[in-house]
Amino acid sequence: MFESDATAIAQRSSTGVLPHRDRVGDLVDEAHARYADCDEGAVADYIPVLAEADASRFGLSLIGADGGSHDAGDVDVAFSIQSISKAFVFALVCEELGHDAVHDVVGVNNTGLPFNSVMAIELNGGSPMNSMVNAGAIATTALVPAANADERWARIRDGLSRFAGRPLMLDGEVYRSESFTNHRNQALGRLLQSYDRLAIGPDEAVDLYTRQCSLAVTARDLAVMGATLACGGLNPFTGERVVSAETSRDTLALLAACGMYERSGEWLFEIGLPAKSGVSGGIVAVAPGKGAVGTFSPPLDPAGNSVRGQRACAYLSRALGLNLFASSPDPARPDAHEGVSR
Ligand code: GLU
């Protein structure tokens, strides 16, 4: 653990503002038009019901920190949130238990291996490694404080609903389809139990995790959920404080490191934003202090990231100047072009 003690030092959020609303709206439309005809990628089929997804669907929503919303395409089509739930359950647990507890119990380093890897656990002495892979997400869900399974589920569902600013509902068909076929996640649960890494029984932990993955959302919901993190935990639509600014910061750091499966490094290199994707085709990408993009398009690359969603986010990151690592000298400063004198 770094001893800078992040929580003790007051930190301001970063970063400038979005261009004028009209310009943002035009660029969202342009991003959608550019990639709507892209036919690369394949719809996930390891959860049977996901194989039935309509590959042509493509929704793109951007919500600014000021609450301004810009939509293009299928932004109201419902799909199961899948892995994107991991980001928000992590935030809820981090809020309840604190920065250090989640860091110590689950971890925050990328595995470099697929999201459902058994080997990652074995190679790391039983550690689930981070809350964005299945093992770490199951361990994180198990940490949600509650007296019983019903209460734990209610806290997860209500917590994610507060991020979205509306009540989120379980997609029963997805839940049943995944529950009948999630043998690998059940194996991960048992393996974690064998390493004494689960705060509750593996059956309950995996069932809750499967439920959270089955919550139905839209691309616009994802944009609102991401915008809440972009606004330091304050939902820009409802005005509700969902989590603290510190929890938002910690969640975004984890997304930057681990949010895009084993392609997280490439994503950060190309796009420069914390983000999370899911196998049903959603992506949420967050520009701290500025806003968030939510996308939905089912065809995925081999790592499990939506192809159209990635392209649209890359386009918007560049066109809107969202990349966290991009900077240029302030032209108003007299020494801006002279470099540092020695
Ligand atoms: N519920 C899915 C699983 O556990 C989520 C995977 C994902 O979206 O990455 O396999």
Image (cartoon, rainbow, N blue to C red):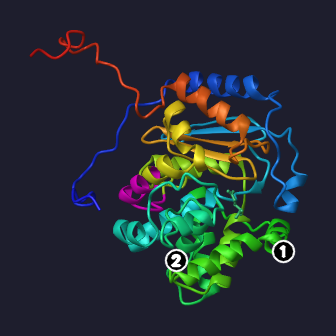
Q: Residue at x 64, y 81 (%)?
A: 190
Q: What element carries label 2?
A: loop
Amino acid type indicated by mark 1? Phe
Residue 84 in view in this figure: yes
Image position of 75 (left or right of 69): right
Mark number for residue 117? none
Q: How many marks?
A: 2
In the rendered image, residue 244 lying in the magenta stretch gets the answer: yes
Q: How far across and how far down the image is residue 191, in percent?
A: 61, 78
- Residue drawn 82% across and 27% down? 37
Q: Mark 2 points at which residue?
A: 144
Q: Quick one: which residue is furthest to the right in this view? A: 52
**Crowding near pointer 2: few (<14 within 10 Å), some, many (20+)?**
many
Q: Which element is circle 1 on?
A: helix
Position of residue 94 in the picture relative to residue 338 (left or right): right
Q: Residue at x 80, y 28 (%)?
A: 38
Label 1, on which residue?
Answer: 180
Q: How far across and down, in percent of the image, does residue 112 sit?
A: 55, 51
Report whether residue 153 is seen. Answer: no
Pointer 2 and pointer 1: residues touching (CB < 8 Å)?
no
Q: Distance between the residues labelled 2 and 1?
A: 24 Å
Q: In which quarter of the image is ligand 1?
A: bottom right
Disc 1 residue lies near ligand 1 with CB under 8 A: no
Highlighted range, magenta: 240-252
Find residue 188 and report its image quarter: bottom right
Q: Which of 206 and 329 is in front in this view?
A: 206
